[in-house]
Amino acid sequence: MSTTADASAGRAQISARTLRTDRWWLPPLWTVIGLSAWVIYATVRVFLQNNYWVPEYHYLTPFYSPCVSLGCDPEAAMFGRFLPDWPILPFGALTLPFLLLFRMTCYYYRKAYYRSFWQSPPACAVAEPHSRYTGETRFPLLGQNLHRYFFYFAVIISVVNTIDAILAFHGEDGGFGIGLGTLVLLGNVIMLWAYTLSCHSCRSIMGGRLNHFSQHPVRYWFWTQITKLNAKHQELAWTTLGTLALTDFYVMAVAAGWFADPRIVN
């Protein structure tokens, strides 16, 4: 007979996994569907190695930025081309592993996939199916403690994405221009910065070691602003998955000629 509590603690032993009568299984199910759909889409796109660049307007999808493969369009390779052009190696392979590790070790995403994929636990007051719990004290979950270092890489990559968004203010004649794609890239990078800066590690870096905020007014101000963002970290985590997919899909559609980029200026 399975139990939900230690009998020695004087708590009741029940055979049911939970006494909850609401649809507690729905949030974990939606999380599995949402994350799985995004991972499948992103995996397919990064290995297609086409329709990632619109040279007329300097639109580069974030899934391929920075484009450093020898197979990249030379105009899209802002930092040069030095990775071999292999079908199994994405054009943006220089940064994709760090972005993946930053997301996987994110405090919110840990909660999301622990509860949904691993059911550890799937919901409050619902017993998990695992017989043992070791937390993040053993390999591979011990690697979750590297999240802060992946945050530094995420900041650098956000800078690269910002440069991409700035270069997207480009017209067909080579001068200044704004199109719908410019706004899509700009909106995406703003959301990426919001998500990255709302990270728990960023908040800790800003104020975690301060004993007297009054002696560090500048850091205290940044800590308070990041704390406000941190309260929205879960929403930003999901929003940025959406903006990344939307931005990639838009660049792909324009590059493939499915429709023309609506121009606002030039």
Image (cartoon, rainbow, N blue to C red):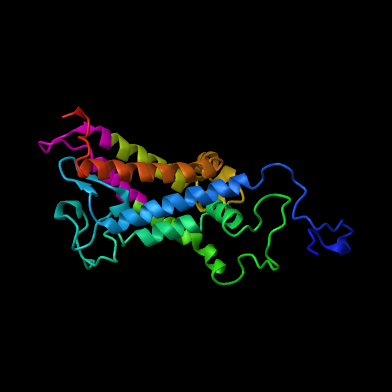
Residue reaching furthest to the bottom: 139
Residue reaching furthest to the left: 173
State left or right for residue 103 relative to residue 11: left
Q: Is residue 52 magenta?
A: no
The residue lying toward the viewer, choosing from 191 and 120, is: 120
**Can you tell which quarter of the image residue 80 is in?**
bottom left
Q: Position of residue 142 (x, y in %)?
A: 56, 68
State left or right for residue 153 relative to residue 180: right
Q: Position of residue 182 (x, y in %)?
A: 26, 36
Q: Is residue 161 magenta?
A: yes
Is residue 200 visible in the rendered image? The answer is no
State left or right for residue 53 relative to residue 135: left
Q: Position of residue 173 (x, y in %)?
A: 10, 36
The residue lying toward the viewer, choosing from 160 and 215, is: 160
Q: Residue at position x 36%, y 57% from top?
A: 43
The residue lying toward the viewer, choosing from 193 and 63, is: 63
Q: Position of residue 34 (x, y in %)?
A: 49, 47
Q: Residue at position x 37%, y 53% from top?
A: 42
Q: Quadrant of the C terminus?
A: top left
Q: Residue at position x 33%, y 42% from top?
A: 247
State left or right for residue 119 relative to residue 265: right
Q: Quadrant of the N terminus?
A: bottom right
Q: From this view, report whether residue 266 is shown above or below residue 83.
A: above
Residue reaching furthest to the top: 264
The number of numbered badges drawn on the structure is 0
Residues in magenta, as a range: 158-181
Q: Residue at position x 23%, y 60% from top?
A: 68
Is residue 37 visible in the rendered image? The answer is yes
